[in-house]
Structures are given as structure tokens and as C-alpha cells.
Image (spheres, helix red, strand yellow):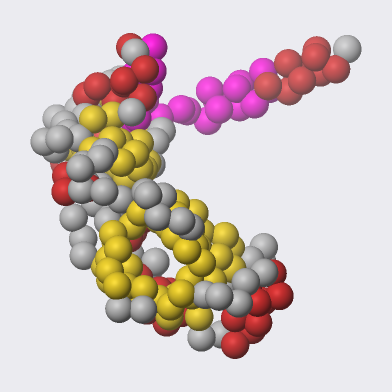
Amino acid sequence: MSDFTLNASARNDLGKGASRRLRRANLEVPAIVYGGEKAPQPISLDKAPFYKAIEDESFFSSVLNLVIDGKKEQVVVRDLQRHPYKPVITHADFMRVDATHAITINVPLHVVGEEKSKGIKDQGGELHVLSNEIQISCLPKDLPDFLEVDITNVELGTTLHLSDLTLPAGVTLVELSHGADHDNAVLSITKPKTRGEAAEGEEGEGEEGEGSAE
């Protein structure tokens, strides 16, 4: 689990106008912390270290140390609100975590072994990643930065599902807790389409569209 620490200050000047003034000053980012037994707390984050932290993929799947006016809380990111066209974070939401309670969070799926994969290197297949993130449940201490799937020995024509993933100790998959019908595919290695097959597929889609219009 990665170690991130963010410094913040409690905000008493609230409302949309206050948030706009904070963003206009371009030094801090408005945010809120909620969850647990405490009341929601509006805060402002130091902008430069926050923007640097969010460049790291593992930031979004880590328990973060949030220091508010010198007092530390452990939190996870729940939402980042972005400007519609500027590279600006307009607001951040954090949820408090408790060491004794499981959290539900999305973590990245990393595929390894592609350059040595039997289905790709030896059999000429193409890799199709169907899920870039996986929703897991675990205690904060067991939270992984990502889940890994090794396709070195995966053959052409194979589809791997959630149940095929190897999980760290203490981690469960949320979808599988809902039953076998939720054992979704995460990746497949398939035979590449020829130009003729691709053209036929496009023609078929066009014909279906014409038929449905009638």
C-alpha cells in the first residue's frame, strides 16, 4: 500500500462563492471529508502537492493520510470534480476510513507477461482488456495498489473472468459476492480479424441499422 500525506486546512468560509475565490487564488483546492462518526468537514488542500499526488495511479486506491490543521485522519478518495475543459480540479471528496471496518474501492488491473504470452507471441492472438478497474472489499491494512494478472501461459481463445484472478490475503471481489452470474470477463486473447471479416462485420451492422429504421 502506497503512503501519501496531504496537508489541509479547515474551511469556515463556505458556499459556491467561497469555493470560486479559493480556486481563483490558485493556491488551494476546495474539498470535503465525510464518513465515520464525525460530521462532514469542508477543507482546502495545498494545490501543488495535491496535483502532484494525483499523477500517481496508486493515489486513487490507497489509504491517504490527511492532516487537517495538524490533526491526522485516514481517508480514501471518493470523487474528484474536474473543470469541463480546463485541466483543473474544482472539488475533491474524501471518505474517512476505520482500521476495523472493510472498505469498498476500485483498484487498477495490471496485465503482465504480454511480451511472453503464449497466446500472443506464439499463437498470434490479440489481447482485449475488458476491465481496467476491479471493485474490491478489504480492511484498510490489506488494500493493494492494484491487482495483477499474468497472461504468460494464457492461450489463444481464452477468456479470463473475475474468478480467475489471484487475490492478496484479506481481499474479496465485490461482484462475486453477488453470485456466479456476476463472474464478469476481464480479458480475452482472440484471433485477429482479417480485413474481409472486418468489412463483413461493418456491412452487417449497416444492414441491421437499415432494418431497424423500417
Question: Which residue is located at x 61 percent, y 21 percent?
Answer: 200
Residue 4 position within the rendered picture, expressed as x and y whole percent measured from the top left: 26, 67
Instruction: Give the side of residue 104 with respect to residue 18, left or right.
Output: left
Image quarter (top left, top right, bottom left or bottom right) of the C terminus: top right
Instruction: Give the side of residue 175 with respect to residue 14, left or right.
Output: left
Q: Nearer the viewer, residue 95 or 202?
A: 95
Residue 183: in magenta span: yes
Image quarter (top left, top right, bottom left or bottom right) of the N terminus: bottom left
Q: Could you tell me if residue 189 is visible in this image? A: no
Q: Quadrant of residue 180?
A: top left
Question: Which residue is located at x 63 percent, y 66 percent?
Answer: 83
Question: Which residue is located at x 33 percent, y 57 percent?
Answer: 75
State whether residue 188 is above or below residue 139: above
Instruction: Give the side of residue 40 with respect to residue 49, left or right.
Output: right
Q: Quadrant of residue 207?
A: top right
Instruction: Give the side of residue 198 with respect to residue 120, left or right.
Output: right
Outermost right residue: 214
Q: Could you tell me if residue 80 is visible in this image? A: yes
Q: Quadrant of residue 134?
A: top left
* Magenta highlight range: 181-204
Residue 184: in magenta span: yes
Residue 124 position within the rendered picture, expressed as x and y whole percent measured from the top left: 29, 32
Residue 98 position within the rendered picture, expressed as x and y whole percent measured from the top left: 26, 48
Residue 195 position within the rendered picture, expressed as x and y whole percent measured from the top left: 53, 30
Q: Nearer the viewer, residue 187 or 203?
A: 187
Question: Which residue is located at x 44 percent, y 60 percent?
Answer: 33
Q: Nearer the viewer, residue 113 or 16?
A: 16
